[in-house]
């Protein structure tokens, strides 16, 4: 019988804290190691004292005229924006506000297929009709390449009713495309470029990293400050720098999307991240880059293990790679990424960001220490030695590309349509009524309004058998799925 006063989430957090794991995952502050000492001290001494509401002197996020306005202006100067908005509902709310700002209901938007699930949510809210760019995956790592500017130009010529272009830059895996050329292509059509830059908030602090989205010419950029810098989870920023989109329009949309009770803890963490990076950003990111290069160099010496290298730069639309995203393949050891992640956690107390069929992803940030890199290398070396590596890359059955979707209905039409539940393995030929996205990273394999294909069912079933978890479906086991009753 459950004891009175039991707090399951609190107990789970305490248990996780006591494990003292090495964090190669979000958030970027890495358990407080990557935040300003002043802010860390405040959180340790009396966090409840600053969990406040809109009282005199503390300003109002929905009508900032005091310290919140000043902090947002400081962030805009630091990140090169005309206007910066603090986001307390994560980058998801920034993506929603951005798409509501650049398109009207029923209009077309050009999207890459490796979008985050929040983009699908924005299409539902805004009633948009998605047009998808072709998707090509790296044959070895099965990671999507960024769309080439030529592909975007061709789609804009073919579909003149497209009213905005959305891009992911960099990708979840650290790949950056030619966003400068893309911006030129998009702006020739006098339409805006919106960029999900969730994983690129640190770019501006090193000349060795890709240009920021705003530097490349984007009109709106959404950054997850919590992913690679020192803000609390859920704290992000939206930056506007545009001659096409009025920042006031974006603010108007945020006004109906963000909570009217914004957390001062989240906003304070954004303020602290801005101040911290303004004073020491280049030094902190340089240190992170050195650690990343050391890890990559050491991994290259371990038989049977391989990670993304800078050799990919200049191929298939890739102009640069963020070295702080270390995507490690275990195909040469005949291990799945899921198995490797479990080994790292159970024996070595190392928690990775993501695992999949072949690989794991380790995310470094300003909170990552050189000692973390040493622990990872020692663990990987032992795993490789015990796995008796075969010395070659084994082919694991499975598709090497995500088939282009056949869009039958808009996401909104499907989402609000009459739905029925069917067995997932019998859904081929039906129109999906819900989203299916492996999480992390949250890239949809199936979106509302799309035809369910045999290839998609096989891919999702394979991932499920390997232990992958999914966001979106009402039945999290994916024994069943909701489909549109009649089309």
Image (tube, rainbow, N blue to C red):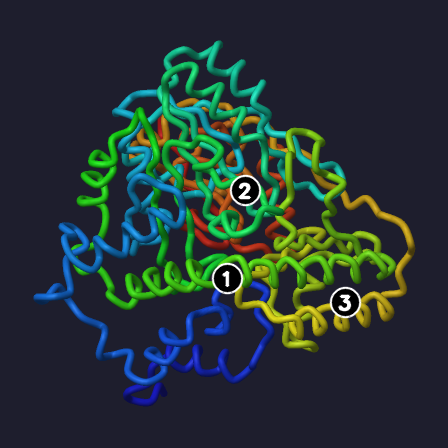
Q: Is residue 32 visible?
A: yes
Dot 3, how many residues are within 10 Å of its Cα: few (below 14), some (14-19), or many (20+)? many
- Residue at the location (60% across, 29% down)? 135
Give the number of the disc on residue 153: none
The answer to the question of whether label 2 and label 1 lie on touching residues, with beta carbons closer than 8 A, is no
Question: How far, Cα to Cα, is label 3 from label 1?
Answer: 20 Å
Residue 156, x across and y down, in percent: 46, 15
**Residue designated by label 1:** 26
Residue 57, x across and y down, in percent: 12, 66
Mark 2 or 1, nearer chain start: 1
65 and 2: which one is in front? 65
Closer to us: mark 3 or mark 2? 2
**Residue designated by label 3:** 380
238 and 94: which one is in front? 238
Dot 1, how many residues are within 10 Å of its Cα: few (below 14), some (14-19), or many (20+)? many
Q: Secondary structure at mark 1?
A: loop
Question: How far, Cα to Cα, is label 3 from label 2?
Answer: 26 Å
In the picture shown, does residue 100 fall above or below 236?
Answer: above
The answer to the question of whether label 3 and label 2 lie on touching residues, with beta carbons closer than 8 A, is no
Left or right of 247, for residue 60: left
- Residue at the location (12% across, 63% down)? 54
**Residue designated by label 2:** 170
Q: Dividing the image into 4 quarters, which one contains the N terminus?
A: bottom left
Q: Secondary structure at mark 3?
A: helix
């Amino acid at each position: 019988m459950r004891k009175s006063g039991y707090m399951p989430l609190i107990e789970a957090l305490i248990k996780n804290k006591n494990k003292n794991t090495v964090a190669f995952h979000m958030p970027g502050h890495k358990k407080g190691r990557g935040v300003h000492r002043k802010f860390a001290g405040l959180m340790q001494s009396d966090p409840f004292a600053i969990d406040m509401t809109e009282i005199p002197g503390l300003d109002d996020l929905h009508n900032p005229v005091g310290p919140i306005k000043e902090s947002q202006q400081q962030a805009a100067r630091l990140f090169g924006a005309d206007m910066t908005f603090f986001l307390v509902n994560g980058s998801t709310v920034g993506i929603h506000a951005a798409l509501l700002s650049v398109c009207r209901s029923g209009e077309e938007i050009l999207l890459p297929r490796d979008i985050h699930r929040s983009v699908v949510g924005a299409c539902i809210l805004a009633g948009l009709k998605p047009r998808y760019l072709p998707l090509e995956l790296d044959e070895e790592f099965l990671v999507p390449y960024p769309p080439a500017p030529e592909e975007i130009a061709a789609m804009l010529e073919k579909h003149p009713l497209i009213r905005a272009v959305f891009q992911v830059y960099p990708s979840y895996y650290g790949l950056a495309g030619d966003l400068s050329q893309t911006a030129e292509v998009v702006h020739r059509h006098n339409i805006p470029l919106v960029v999900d830059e969730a994983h690129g908030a640190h770019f501006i602090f090193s000349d060795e990293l890709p240009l920021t989205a705003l530097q490349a010419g984007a009109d709106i950029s959404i950054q997850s400050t919590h992913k690679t810098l020192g803000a609390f989870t859920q704290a992000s920023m939206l930056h506007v720098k545009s001659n096409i989109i009025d920042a006031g329009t974006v603010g108007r949309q945020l006004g109906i999307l963000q909570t009217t009770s914004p957390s001062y803890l989240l906003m304070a963490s954004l303020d602290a991240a801005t101040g911290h990076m303004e004073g020491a950003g280049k030094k902190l990111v340089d240190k992170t880059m050195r650690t990343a290069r050391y890890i990559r160099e050491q991994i290259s010496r371990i038989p049977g293990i391989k990670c993304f290298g800078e050799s990919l730069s200049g191929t298939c639309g890739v102009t640069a790679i963020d070295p702080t995203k270390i995507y490690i393949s275990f195909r040469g050891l005949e291990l799945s990424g899921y198995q490797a992640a479990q080994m790292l956690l159970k024996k070595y107390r190392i928690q990775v960001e993501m695992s999949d069929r072949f690989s794991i992803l380790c995310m470094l940030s300003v909170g990552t220490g050189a000692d973390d890199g040493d622990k990872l290398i020692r663990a990987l070396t032992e795993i490789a030695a015990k796995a008796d590596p075969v010395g070659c890359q084994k082919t694991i059955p499975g598709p090497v590309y995500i088939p282009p979707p056949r869009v039958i209905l808009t996401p909104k039409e499907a989402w609000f349509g009459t739905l029925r539940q069917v067995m997932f393995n019998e859904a081929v030929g039906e129109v999906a009524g819900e989203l299916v996205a492996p999480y992390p990273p949250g890239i949809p394999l199936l979106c509302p309004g799309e035809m369910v294909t045999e290839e998609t069912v096989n891919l999702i079933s394979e991932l499920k058998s390997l232990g992958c978890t999914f966001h979106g479906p009402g039945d999290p086991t994916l024994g069943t799925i909701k489909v549109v009753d009649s089309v």
